[in-house]
Image: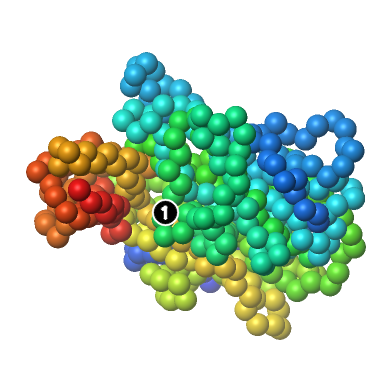
Amino acid sequence: MLALLASLAGAALLSAYGAAAATAAGPASPVPGGDAGLANQGADEGGSPAPVPKMGATGPGSKRRAAEWHETGEYAGPTYNCVGDYYEELGRAWAGWYGDVGISPQVNDVYYVKAGWGISGFPCGTGGARVHVEMVLPAYTKLAITQANRVRCFYKSPQQSNAQEFQQDCPQNPGTGWNGGPSFDPPGEAAWPTATGALFEIWVPVKSTQPLNGITPPDPQPCTTCLYVGTWMIDGNNSPWVWPKMPVYVTGSASAANPSVSYPAPATGNITYNTGTTFVEARLYGNVYTEGTGGTARFEMGPSKGNYDSQGEAIGIPTGGNWQAYEDWQMTPGRTYHWRLCYTPSGSGKICGADQTINAPPETAIADVTVKKPKHKATFTFSSPEVPPNMSVTYQCRLDNGAFQACSSPKTYSHLSGKHTFSVRAVDQAGHKDASPAKESFKI
């Protein structure tokens, strides 16, 4: 136990691996939901990648002769195979970094990390999945994309034996993922169409300004030295997320650093639906690197980036060490919220982490579009991913500017010609609608 703090707002108990209780906030939405705290994270302690990727995730070998990829992966699923009438793994995603352990990369070197995925299952009605990919970089690590050090993209079709590098549609200007890290979707699109049997890899240049020890700490401690690859496989069935993580080893001497805020992956958890209040409840997480300071951390949330009109409880940060803060919030279902964690060292100004987003369920995702031009027909397969317990979902569809009407997946339209836009939104049992319907434009 580190400290027992008391205030007019309630009591907070800080422990090295424990939680802190805080006074519940009022019924407005979004609001802090009644639990906040800290966990001690402990202390943290380039080269060019090979021209041809080894697709997949096998993990580092037992011998080190030169720089190589060090990677690990996780399976995603299950998905329903309606041809064989059984459930199977949907696919696999992996994360990795390139270097020679103990030699390269060194502090301030440019080196490569990667995200990879493949679809092995045969989802009913889609024959693959659309895949969104984002990264949460290790502590003290930033993107280093330049003309000389570009993002590199590789693809292996089900018919190919080797991966081929491609430049068109390889994203050189990443977006912002739902967990605040960079996202690497194709330009102008929300996800990569990935057929069953296909593999993708995206290599990203980065630079670390502090050493990383390449060690994954025991649960429940977060891995601040890890690269996390968030991979959302949208298959029209379960549409699972998978988060492979790989600890990164960067050698060199530590230099003076300022306090900073980052986020674990994923940065939200414990998402539930309260049937009494009809609120979605979720826990937010953030990492505070004090660099020898102490002060106060606070979560902020609002309807848009830069407009954080709701404030969380003040969380005391002890002097020294690295800490993970968390807090529970209540939100209106179907809305998208922006949030961040800010840390104010004693006697200094506020330091805030990157803007984060959370989409309070229900959400909607289009998994597959089948257009039959000779028959003037279009069929759409969709789902509501990661519906929390106690929430039930129905759907409303519309074509072009028509009214939304009740529908189910798959939805087929006939007698079509020209350009059209299909929209679909999920609705919970209390009537809350997804405020950002999924859309797909097509032409017959």
Task: Pick whichever, 381 or 212, lies toward us.
Answer: 381
- Where does the image place residue 238, in percent across and percent down from the top left? 39, 35
Does 157 appear above or below 173?
Answer: above
Q: Could you tell whether 414 is left or right of 337 in the image?
A: left
Q: Quadrant of residue 38?
A: bottom right
Q: Position of residue 282 (x, y in %)?
A: 45, 52
Percent position (x, y) of residue 438?
A: 30, 52
Colouring mode (rainbow / by chain / secondary structure / one colour): rainbow
| Image-quadrant location for residue 419 | bottom left
- The residue indicated by pointer 1 is 190
Residue at 45 percent across and 31 percent down: it is 196
| 5 and 359: which is toward the camera | 359
Query: Horizontal and vertical percent for residue 345?
Result: 69, 76
Tell me the residue at 90%/50% (across/down): 103
Q: Residue at x 61, y 38 (%)?
A: 163
Helix, strand or loop at disc 1? loop
Neighbour tally class for label 1: few under 14, some 14-19, many 20 plus, Cα within 10 Å: some
| Residue at point 37%, 54% (across, down) | 360
